[in-house]
Amino acid sequence: MFYRETGQYKTNYAADMALFPIRQDRIGMVLILIVAFVVIPLTMSSFTLSAVMIPILIFALASIGLNLLTGYTGLISLGTAGFMGVGAYATYKLTTLFPDANIVLLILLSGFVAAAVGVVFGLPSLRIKGFYLAVATLAAQFFLSWCFVRVPWLVNYNISNAIEVPTRTMFDIPITGPNATPVARYLVVLTVVVVMTWIASNIVRGRIGRSWMAVRDMDIAAELIGIRLYRTKLLAFAVSSFYCGVAGALMVFLWLGAAEADSFNINQSFIILFMVIIGGLGSLVGSFFGAAFIWGLPIVLRAAPEFFGISVHAATVEHLQFMVVGALIIFFLIVEPHGLARLWQIGKQKLRVWPFPY
């Protein structure tokens, strides 16, 4: 009754191919942005912003990067955390070389460094795919992790071998460093994530995105209709690594405040892969669902027993998290391979025809 397309006529091709062709979707997106930019900063505590909202946004951006490669192009990657580390270390070096530059600009520039590294490690995709490509990207993860530990130049020969985030301001407001407030950091991260998500949505709906999906569905047929496989695959690696690099820089400079090489280990890559699988392959909104679910699951598992007056050890919560995530991955791969995003689409489709069953 409230979610109908009746009476909403499309008079041109641009209106039919709009990002939100249904009026209710546009209204809903405006409300979501109002809540994200206004309500949440005014109502949530500093702890909730720092420990829940900021990491969810950052991991959602990293999931979008992996989804562009795996979900839309069909290329498996297990080196996501390594590319995130490239972005973080590149930002740290850029802040040293350009101490007066805008930190957000440096974070975006670090994404291009990560994109260049991603193209280098994406070269094997020109000849191999599937399991062998996954092993190649896994090798990239281990090599980058080795560089983060063994190359002291990356941390300016810091004896602690860690990234130390300096204080940087925007409009005279600290957004990085110990003096930055959680609200300021949250708003910067939210703005970057919203803009980059909008760019990604336009990419996947355009010529480049259609080329990626053609390669994903059948690369031989894509080549026969004129798509250049090598250029398309390398472009997918570049864009994916760019998003992951920006996410890694945001993670260190606007969330953690400092980081060591272990912050970008193989476990991080698998966590982001799980977010993509549970959220939904080939779906941008699924990246947000997966990030919110994986990051919020231990919080819910820890809070639920306390709500009922039951004391649960932290180690038990961690084991329960592994069990639940593992079971859900198996469930979604068998029952609904498109993850939570597909369930969201089904719910919207039911609303279109409600109260009728068809």
Image: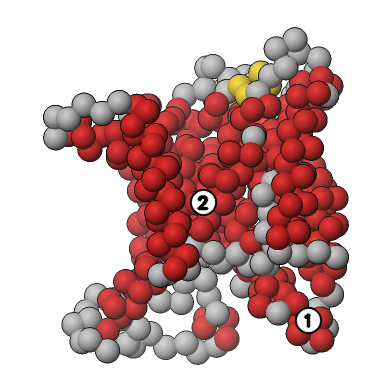
Q: Residues within 10 Å of mark 2 (few under 14, many from 20)?
A: many
Q: Quadrant of residue 238?
A: bottom right
| Residue 177 located left or right of residue 336 | right
| Residue 51 located left or right of residue 147 | left
Q: Are marks 2 and 1 in contact (CB under 8 Å)?
A: no
Residue with the most extreme top position: 159
Instruction: Identify the residue at image location x=35%, y=74%.
Output: 346
Read off the residue under disc 2.
274
Read off the residue under disc 1.
220
Marks 2 and 1, how far apart at CA: 29 Å
* Quadrant in which the N terminus is drawn: bottom left
Which amino acid lies under the numbered mark 1 shown in the image of this protein?
A: Ile
Which label number is shown at residue 328? none
Depth check: give the residue in front, 355 or 143: 143
Instruction: Identify the residue at image location x=64%, y=27%.
Output: 262
Which mark sits nearer the N-terminus, 2 or 1?
A: 1
* Quadrant in which the C terminus is drawn: bottom left
- Residue 198 spot, x, y in % from top left: 57, 59
- Residue 184 spot, x, y in % from top left: 49, 31
- Residue 341 spot, x, y in % from top left: 43, 65
Q: Residues within 10 Å of mark 1 (few under 14, many from 20)?
A: few
Instruction: Identify the residue at image location x=33%, y=42%.
Output: 39
Instruction: Identify the residue at image location x=56%, y=30%.
Output: 254
SS at mark 1 in the image? helix
Depth check: give the residue in front, 225 or 193: 225
Above-or-below relation of 352 to 320: below
Which amino acid lies under the numbered mark 2 shown in the image of this protein?
A: Phe
- Residue 52 spot, x, y in % from top left: 41, 36
Whether residue 343 is visible here, answered yes or no, is: yes
What is the number of callouts on the image?
A: 2
